Amino acid sequence: IMWPYKRERAVMTGGKYIVPFTEKGAKLAFFLTNEENLAEFAGKLYLIPDRKDLADKVKIEDPLINEVYAVVMKDLAESTRGSMVPDWYDPDTAAIVQTNRTVINDHIKAAIAKEKTPEQAFKELAAILRKAAGK
């Protein structure tokens, strides 16, 4: 069913990351995120693409799933981008998140690559973001 009506009702939470560590991994990442491939995967696996521009390119053969997909995509289309990624548009957090995007990514990568423990990466990142927020 559709989300209860209100001006903002989308549920997308923002972009996802693929972190390849090899050339083969990079090729796979580009393959997975290619517009045509992403639309095909979404259609065959009944996934909602995280890109609104793919909405019309996803082809779903199952009539019931196709109907559900249409409802979800309508909700997304009728919501603004700001409702989908609150931290990027919220006046209290947007500047901090956008300014520190590289820092955030670097700390995630360091934890994934085991250059730092997740706890170390999180604590360092928290300190950086607190300082940026003036807290």
Image (cartoon, rainbow, N blue to C red):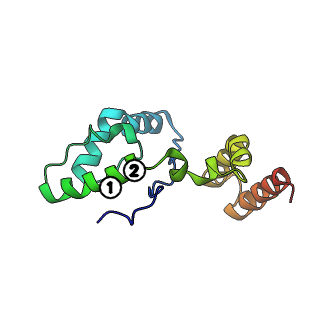
When asked about the image quadrant of residue 1, the answer is: bottom left
Task: Report, in whole angstroms, how far the alpha carbon at label 2 lies from the one at label 1.
Answer: 6 Å
When asked about the image quadrant of residue 99, the answer is: top right
| Location of residue 67 in the rendering, given as x and y in whole percent from the top left corner | 19, 55
Q: Amino acid at mark 2?
A: Leu
Q: Nearer the viewer, residue 17 or 69?
A: 69
Crowdedness of circle 2 by 10 Å Cα count: few (<14), some, many (20+)?
A: many
**Residue occupying image coordinates x 41% and y 42%:** 51
CB within 8 Å, label 2 to label 1: yes
Q: Which residue is mark 1?
A: 72
State the mark number for residue 76: 2
State the mark number for residue 117: none
When asked about the image quadrant of residue 69, the answer is: bottom left
Is residue 51 found left or right of 125 in the rendered image?
left
Q: Nearer the viewer, residue 13 or 102?
A: 13
| Location of residue 19 in the rendering, given as x and y in whole percent from the top left corner | 53, 44
Work out which residue is located at the far front of the displayed protein and give it.
Answer: 6
Q: Is residue 64 visible?
A: yes
Q: Is residue 18 visible?
A: no
Q: Secondary structure at mark 1?
A: helix
Q: Amino acid at mark 1?
A: Val
Q: Number of callouts in the render?
A: 2
Q: Secondary structure at mark 2?
A: helix
| Location of residue 20 in the rendering, given as x and y in whole percent from the top left corner | 51, 41
Q: Quadrant of the C terminus?
A: bottom right
Q: Nearer the viewer, residue 82 or 119?
A: 82
Is residue 43 found left or right of 51 in the rendered image?
left
